[in-house]
Image: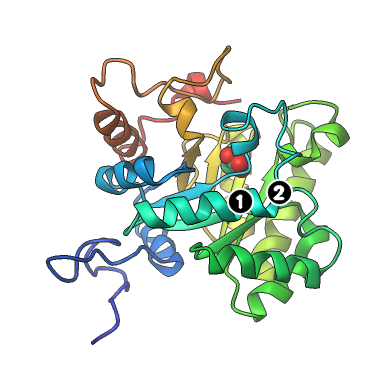
Amino acid sequence: MAPPDHTPGAKPPGQSDSATRPVRVTVPALQAMAHEGRRIAMLTCYDASLAAQCDAAGVDALLVGDSLGMVIQGHTSTLPVTVADVVYHTRCVARGSQRALIIADMPFGSYQASPEVAYAASVEALQAGAQMVKLEGGAWLAPTIEFLVRRSVPVCGHIGLTPQSVHAFGGYRVQGKSDAAADAVIADARALGEAGCGLIVVECVPRLLTPRLESAAGVPVIGIGAGPECAGQVLVIYDALGITPGKPARFVRDFMKDAGSVGAALAGYVGAVRDRSFPGPQHCF
Ligand code: KIV
């Protein structure tokens, strides 16, 4: 059988090659989308039922986020999440999804100590059904990213506000606000792009930084609280469906409002990312 064609101009990623089985979205396909100026819609996902709904709505990538520690397990941070938790939820998502790229978020303590430790945890995630792993951290993580990429583990970076560093930051705060802090986030983006990241999530930075980030990274930047100029957007799915308790963060939009069904809300999210109506100025820093 011929391999799926993900070159620019080919059929959209994830479109069915046969009547029965959709082609799974790949990292090169997302890079081609960004190259063509088509926005990438990513959501977190932790279970099979919502994974199937996301596929039907056209979500491009599903992040099995360590936010599961907060929205599924009820912790006050992501720090208690284990590799076993991420592996379990990745298996659930992989059973429900046939189309979206699945990214497993490597939890606190599973990759920081050494490239070898990161590789062992990443192998578990890929064997559970992920096609990519996500690691939080800047330039200091470049040797680990290179180590993984050379061993065929696709890596998504995560810079700006990295929630696993909540105690080091002293809270969940917007990053890159001063000139020096902005330069540091840009340097992180460059280091991660050069180390071989295929995508980079950037969380909670002033939107004015995004064009510099995109050009420094050289790969698609997926924003959460980083402005509409990013190549793609990601939200925690429970935030997008308006079911996270408490006051939502500034960058959140409740797509369930007026949608009528979960499917319509998810399709509304994808549509708003694609036509660039989300995030609006009220969601930016
Ligand atoms: O775990 C998560 O949900 C994340 C997103 C905030 C990007 O890392």
Q: Quadrant of the N terminus?
A: bottom left
Q: In the image, what residue occupies the spot 28% across and 67% down?
A: 23
Q: In the image, what residue occupies the spot 35% across and 30% down?
A: 277
Q: In the image, what residue type sits under mark 2?
A: Thr
What whole-number distance in Å separates the C-alpha atoms at marks 1 and 2?
Answer: 7 Å
| Residue at mark 2 | 82
Q: Quadrant of the C terminus?
A: top right
Q: In the image, what residue occupies the spot 32% across and 72% down?
A: 6
**Front residue (pair 148, 5):** 148
Ligand 1 occupies quarter: top right
Residue 252 is marked as none
Left or right of 2? Residue 78 is right
Location of residue 246 in the rendering, given as x and y in whole percent from the top left corner: 58, 12
Instruction: Give SS at disc 2.
Output: loop
Residue 165 higher or lower than 93, as above or below? above
Instruction: Give SS at disc 1.
Output: helix
Residue 86 is marked as 1
Q: In the image, what residue type sits under mark 1?
A: Val
Furthest residue in direction left, as rendered:
19
Display coloring = rainbow
